[in-house]
Image (spheres, rainbow, N blue to C red):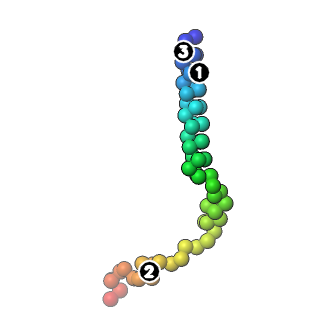
Amino acid sequence: MSALFIMIGASLLLALGFLIAFIWAVKKGQYEDDYSPSVRILFDNPPSDSDNKSTTTEDK
């Protein structure tokens, strides 16, 4: 029976930890922009300078 009380106490402590982590994430702004990440994958990245240059010299 005492193991049951230990497990209930541990689960409540773990739940409290998750609640604190969630509140901390909300206050830090982790859930501010939930639309842009889902749309960002649809757009191509602009080509960089390193993509345009040929790095192989075997063709010469």
User: What residue is rendered at 59% in x and 26% in y?
Assistant: 12
Q: Nearer the viewer, mark 1 or mark 3?
A: 1
Residue 44 found in image quarter? bottom right
Residue 8's label in the rendered image is 1
Residue sitting at the far bottom:
60
User: What residue is rendered at 33% in x and 83% in y?
Assistant: 57
Q: Earlier in the sequence, mark 2 or mark 3?
A: 3
User: What residue is rendered at 58% in x and 16% in y?
Assistant: 4
Q: Mark 2 points at which residue?
A: 49
Residue 16 found in image quarter? top right
Q: From mark 2 to mark 3, how far is it between C-alphas?
A: 63 Å
Against 28, is 35 above or below?
below
Q: Mark 3 points at which residue?
A: 3
Against 17, is 49 above or below?
below
Residue sitting at the far front:
27
Q: Which element is circle 3 on?
A: helix
